[in-house]
Image (cartoon, helix red, strand yellow):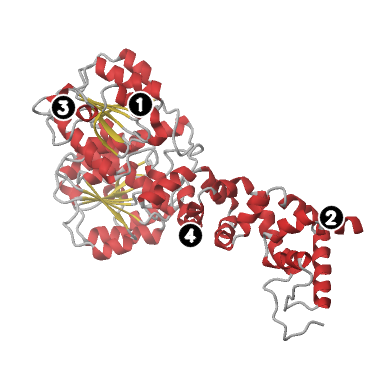
Amino acid sequence: MTGKVKSLYSRPHVERLGEISPCYSSLAHLRENPDVPHAPFTPLQFLQRSWRYFDGCRKHRQAIKKLLEDPELLHDCAKEEHRRHIKKLLRDPELLHRCSDEREKLSLFFASKLDLSRLAFDMGTIVVPDECVLLQEIVERSNALPGPIIEIGTLFGETTTRIATWKAPHKKVVTVDNYSWNPWNVSPLTHVSLTQKVLKYLTETGHVEVRSCDKNAFYAEYRGERPSMVFLDADHSYEATKADIAWAQRVGALIISGHDYGDSFSGVGRAVVEAGGAVRHVEGLWALNGPYWETAAGKTPWMPARAKAA
Amino acid sequence: MEDPAVPQAPFAPLQFLRRGWRYFRECHKHRQDIRRLLENPDLLHRCAEEHEKLFLYFASKFDLSQIAFDTGTMVFSQERELFEEIVGRSNALPGPIIEIGTLFGETTTRIAIWKAPHKKIITVDNYSWNPWKISSFTHESLTRRVLKYLTETGHVELHSCEKDAFYAEYRGERPSMVFLDADHSYEATKADIAWAKSVGATIISGHDYWDCCPGVGQAVMEAGGAVRHVGGMWALNGPYWETAPGKSSWIPARAKAA
């Protein structure tokens, strides 16, 4: 018993505990400077309080031992500025865990001041109004060009629906997905069922053709008309984006654009720059520089990225 | 024993241990998450301030893996055939199609596929029930997503409200057709049919005329009976069917009752 008390009273422990409470600081201060007057404490009170402190330490020694494993965290948790917030989050540990898991997305959300209640439904799709404005402009440009609009990466059909809203009535949208990923963690079967439900009207009325297959298989089999526009929003790795752009160029797509040109997907940015750069880039949405933008129809007040690069 | 005049420290050590014990124990338990959030204290503060919204956000990322997509909607092909015919008939009549009970917009989408291009669909739901047991917020969000194209292009008008409130406020054109597929109790179906008649709906039809929903059958019978009833789908007898083109292929329920 004496040994344990001695150990708890030893300098490193008291100093560490001293960081988490003004009371412990006082005790540490008194230990270091027994001669300095400390008004609230009479010697008897000090002894009483010290006794209770050590008695508490003895009772909760396991907990204290654990807490002291990470003094830095303990220190932060004890800070008044954080304590109130951490307490709130600790009421629902699952929420705390998910906040921690999705902290990058949440940081972006808090920075952009979007409506959080919509975030879950918009995740993985175009959410920023400026992106929508640019996509609408690109779709409307493609309306004047021959050929279908090809979207790589259907997800739940949100962007497909937007494109269908803006496209000319005669224009067809072909959308491709292998349903290997979705932000809601639903099974591929549920994913495809839900997407079919969302796009049911558009597919039944012939506006949209849904292709449930791997994009590479689609690329290999595509024998259709030269696309007026290809929109790339599937695998955002450098290699995949490079291959997607190469295919779009090979089939003679007049407008090539895509999503997720951001820091989180640096592979997209690199592939776009290597393929000629972005003629326009708003948030995550990009349109690739190319011959179309040199033509009269493609002339735009935008400053071409190619010129900028030069 | 202690002098009451002596000012007390904010926490006595033991009190502090007791009060702080749970807090720090929880901090320790969730140290990985807290440590990661503490890398950006501002984010931690915002997460705590908006924890209710965040809860909603995470809750709406539901798992649909076990969900049957057809629950609560028309599943039988005979029902769909009858419904298509009724929508086709309403295309020749003036006024919108009003659907009471949107659910996830499955039937609304069917109506939109079959309706004439000029015809408008008005669909009403309060999102109080769904077979997938997802929150009202998620239910509405999902329905809005399913019907997004149709609402943005003006084919469908979505009303998120109580049907009784909609009934009280409706000042629109006489509907060509009212389709009832919301509350299937006797009282509610009776009130729905009464409203449809009061606004002069030319065709009144609905769903869930099953043995398991006896209220629907009872209300339909009291209102004149079903001119046609296939699966759970029904079309109410009424003046339209006396003069309706092609009515001969059906045996009017009114005649059957007689």
Tell me the amino acid under the disc marked 4.
Glu
Whether residue B39 sits left or right of residue A193 in the image: it is right
Q: Do the residues marked 4 and 1 share a common chain?
A: no
Please give the label number shown on residue B49. Answer: 4
Q: Do the residues marked 2 and 3 share a common chain?
A: yes
Residue placed most toward the observer, B185 or B49 = B49
Q: Residues within 10 Å of mark 2 (few under 14, many from 20)?
A: few
Q: Which residue is pictured at 24% across the width and 37% down the height?
A: A135
The reply to whether residue B212 is in sight is no
Please give the label number shown on residue A293. Answer: 3
Look at mark 2 in the image and give the residue it sits on: A7
Q: Do the residues marked 1 and 3 share a common chain?
A: yes
In contact (CB < 8 Å): disc 3 and disc 4:
no
Horizontal and vertical percent position of residue B91: 17, 43
Q: Residues within 10 Å of mark 4 (few under 14, many from 20)?
A: some
Horizontal and vertical percent position of residue B208: 39, 47
Q: Earlier in the sequence, mark 1 or mark 3?
A: 1
Q: Nearer the viewer, mark 3 or mark 4?
A: 3
Mark 3: which secondary structure?
helix
Tell me the amino acid under the disc marked 1.
Arg
State how far apart marks 1 and 3 are (Cα). Answer: 20 Å
Look at mark 1 in the image and give the residue it sits on: A270
The residue furthest front is A35
Q: For mark 1, name the chain.
A: A
